[in-house]
Image: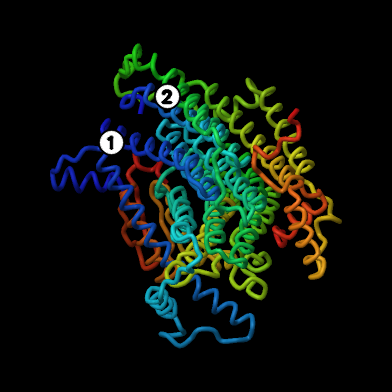
């Protein structure tokens, strides 16, 4: 039984870490987002193994069902089709690698030196299943002990909702204009002219380009 | 299932298999059964849908293969399997290959928490209802993969429409069922079903008044409103007619499925029909438990479901010892099928009394299973 | 689980995931990639919380509650962050973090 659990744990760990590595290393950003989803799934499986089934379900619902879809939409709304094979890493990417590896070593070194890595002694009578707090207790806690935090979380979500709409909102007049062929042609030549002068393009042009790239979204 | 396997392996064969192995085998057998159920019901849903739509449009529909065209789904299946599998040259091969799997897998996962009868639930998860919707939202990722990897405008547009629709209609679906959850006080589907037995929801039987099945939540005002909201949201999630813009074939060919052919296309169809079936099932379990012979339209749509809950009613009504009136051969057959499955959990003895009645008695210590 | 895998193993997984996320956030140029790195780090934190909850105080709800709040914050962060990415793209036509440098002195 212990061996089975250890094997499952090893498989889940491999999934989490491998998928996370692919997420940060892979060139194509859509592939990165898909690997991220795999990693989220691994984390949900780990929660299931830790017997936190409610958190596992919430992980799938929020991360896999919502956050990753949001990320995929954002990538598709901001993708530059012409610029796909561009460099994905910053020039000094090795600084990031050094920082990450150093942090991992600093955290793990004391643990490797001092920690015992033995299993805790079994509490209570042997074989008795531990009493686990489930969704029912969680729900009761939210309306009694953690009421204030719960309300604040709700407020945060409301603020985030409004904020996201305000930030990403585009005026309808700008967004919905369908360009005629002549306008499109003029826009394209103007763009290439702007590019050759190496200046940042004007905001209005930018808005119209977004519109053309994402027409028919809704 | 675990009990039966335990009996076969350890008692009959004397293999001394460890408990976890027995449990694992039990789950695998259940999973295999469910995986066989899914394509099967999908095949006959397609047939039923085509016939029904044809009737509405004053056509005949498929009627060539087999009696009344009943073997049409089999012919379709053979066609799917033997068609050439085409992958566009500019497609992202791996994502293109994985997308149908990612769409189908969640719908199969959803079977894991669906109760089929008393004691017949693959996993009675504490957060079962939430699990159902969490997993159903995963297939949106698969749709996005399909649309993007095909490298085709129509596919991408269809995928965007489908995903936007799925994500947005999930919220009313979950919120409408939240009313039911608050009624019951539990997220477990088994507990939700249990709460609907008896005369009035959450109260149970009242002495001397016959059980008319009024305990379904749909007969309570909140449940009725929740049913309407959920029905609309479920239509949108299943991409059925008023909400079928993701594959509006006059605008965007076939949406995210445009570049798929052969069995991969079949997998998308499978996912869609299984999802529809599951949505019907969850509606029935949450709102209309024990929908027996009421010729309700929804039950007709989920034909398999109505049949199955008919069997349930007969068994559930049997307390410790009960007499059942069997109305037809069909009833007897269904009851026997159901009982065969239930016996594993509560071994019953039954004997025919005269012509129409059947006496069922259960051992006292196993009665709580019912 | 508690009888088969020591808690240090779970915490190591979380630490590794956090560092991978940190690398992603530091080394990537694309703003969306940076957000992906941040999401990985938040997940690592959640693994820690759930592990401590499971191994040391499984009968209380504090650990799970905390994890739920972090998931809430992560969802809000993703929504606002991605909205900002889209706003940046609209005015700069790029999502490259190095090109958005008008505050440079």
Q: Which residue is mark 1?
A: A4
Residue under pointer 2? C11
Q: Nearer the viewer, residue A131 or C37?
A: C37
Judged from this view, the residue extending furthest toward the right is A173
Q: Residue B208 or B62: which is nearer the viewer?
A: B62
A111 left or right, relative to A4:
right
Of labels 1 and 2, the one closer to you:
2
Residue B198: x percent and y percent?
Answer: 55, 47
Query: What subunit carries mark 1?
Result: A
**Percent position of residue A131, x then y:** 43, 24
Q: Residue at x 78, y 65 (%)?
A: A184
Q: Residue furthest left?
A: B14
Task: Give the quadrant of the N terminus of chain A.
Answer: top left
- The Cα atoms of the two marked residues, 1 and 2, are separated by 20 Å
Mark 2 burial class by Cα count in 10 Å: few <14, some 14-19, many 20+: many
Find residue B231 and report its horizontal and vertical position in percent: 64, 58
């Amino acid at each position: 039984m212990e061996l089975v659990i250890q094997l499952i744990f090893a498989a889940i760990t491999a999934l989490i870490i491998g998928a996370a590595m692919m997420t940060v290393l892979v060139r194509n950003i859509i592939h990165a987002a898909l690997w991220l989803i795999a990693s989220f799934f691994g984390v949900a499986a780990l929660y299931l193994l830790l017997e936190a089934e409610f958190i596992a379900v919430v992980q799938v619902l929020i991360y896999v069902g919502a956050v990753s879809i949001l990320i995929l939409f954002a990538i598709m709304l901001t993708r530059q089709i012409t610029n796909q094979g561009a460099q994905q890493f910053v020039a000094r990417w090795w600084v990031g690698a050094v920082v990450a590896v150093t942090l991992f070593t600093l955290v793990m070194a004391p643990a490797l030196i001092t920690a015992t890595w033995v299993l805790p002694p079994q509490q209570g009578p042997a074989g008795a299943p531990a009493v686990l707090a489930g969704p029912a207790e969680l729900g009761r806690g939210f309306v009694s002990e953690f009421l204030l935090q719960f309300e604040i979380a709700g407020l945060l979500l409301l603020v985030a909702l409004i904020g996201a709409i305000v930030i990403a909102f585009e005026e309808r007049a700008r967004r919905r204009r369908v360009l005629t062929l002549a306008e499109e042609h003029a826009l394209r030549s103007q763009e290439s002219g702007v590019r050759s002068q190496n200046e940042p393009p004007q905001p209005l042009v930018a808005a119209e380009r977004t519109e053309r790239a994402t027409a028919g979204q809704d | 299932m675990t009990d039966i396997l335990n009996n076969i392996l350890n008692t009959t064969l004397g293999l001394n298999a460890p408990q976890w192995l027995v449990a694992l085998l039990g789950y695998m057998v259940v999973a295999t059964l469910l995986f066989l159920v899914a394509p099967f019901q999908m095949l006959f849903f397609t047939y039923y849908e085509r016939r029904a739509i044809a009737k509405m449009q004053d056509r005949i529909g498929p009627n060539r293969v087999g009696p009344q065209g009943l073997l049409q789904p089999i012919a379709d299946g053979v066609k799917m399997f033997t068609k050439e599998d085409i992958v566009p040259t500019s497609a992202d091969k791996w994502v293109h290959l994985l997308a149908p799997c990612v769409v189908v897998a969640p719908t199969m996962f959803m079977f894991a928490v669906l109760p089929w009868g008393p004691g017949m639930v693959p996993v009675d998860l504490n957060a079962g209802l939430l699990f159902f919707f969490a997993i159903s939202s995963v297939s949106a990722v698969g749709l996005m993969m399909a649309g993007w990897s095909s490298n085709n405008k129509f596919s991408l547009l269809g995928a965007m429409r489908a995903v936007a629709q799925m994500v947005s209609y999930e919220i009313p679906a979950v919120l409408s069922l939240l009313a039911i959850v608050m009624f019951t006080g539990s997220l477990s589907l088994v507990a939700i079903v249990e709460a609907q037995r008896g005369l009035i929801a959450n109260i149970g039987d009242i002495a001397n008044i016959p059980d008319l099945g009024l305990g379904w939540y749909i007969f309570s005002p909140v449940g009725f409103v929740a049913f309407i909201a959920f029905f609309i949201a479920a239509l949108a999630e299943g991409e059925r007619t008023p909400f079928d813009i993701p594959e509006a074939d006059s605008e965007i060919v076939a949406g995210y499925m445009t570049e798929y052919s052969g069995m991969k296309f079949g997998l998308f169809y499978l996912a869609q029909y299984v999802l529809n079936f599951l949505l019907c099932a969850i509606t029935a379990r949450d709102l209309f438990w024990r929908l027996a012979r009421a010729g309700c339209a929804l039950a007709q749509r989920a034909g398999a479901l109505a049949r199955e809950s008919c069997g349930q009613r007969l068994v559930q009504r049997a307390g410790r010892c009960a007499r059942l009136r069997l109305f037809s051969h069909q009833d007897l057959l269904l009851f026997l099928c159901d009982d065969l499955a239930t016996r594993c959990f509560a071994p019953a003895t039954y004997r025919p009394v005269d012509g129409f009645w059947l006496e069922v008695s259960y051992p006292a210590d196993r009665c709580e299973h019912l | 689980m508690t009888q088969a895998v020591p808690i240090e193993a779970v915490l190591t997984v979380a630490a590794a995931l956090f560092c991978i996320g940190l690398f992603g956030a530091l080394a990537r140029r694309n703003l969306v990639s940076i957000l992906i790195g941040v999401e990985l780090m938040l997940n690592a934190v959640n693994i820690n919380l759930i592990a401590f909850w499971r191994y040391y105080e499984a009968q209380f709800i504090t650990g799970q509650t905390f994890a739920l709040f972090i998931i809430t914050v992560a969802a809000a962060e993703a929504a606002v962050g991605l909205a900002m990415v889209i706003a940046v793209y609209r005015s700069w036509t790029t999502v490259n973090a190095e090109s958005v440098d008008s505050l440079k002195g």
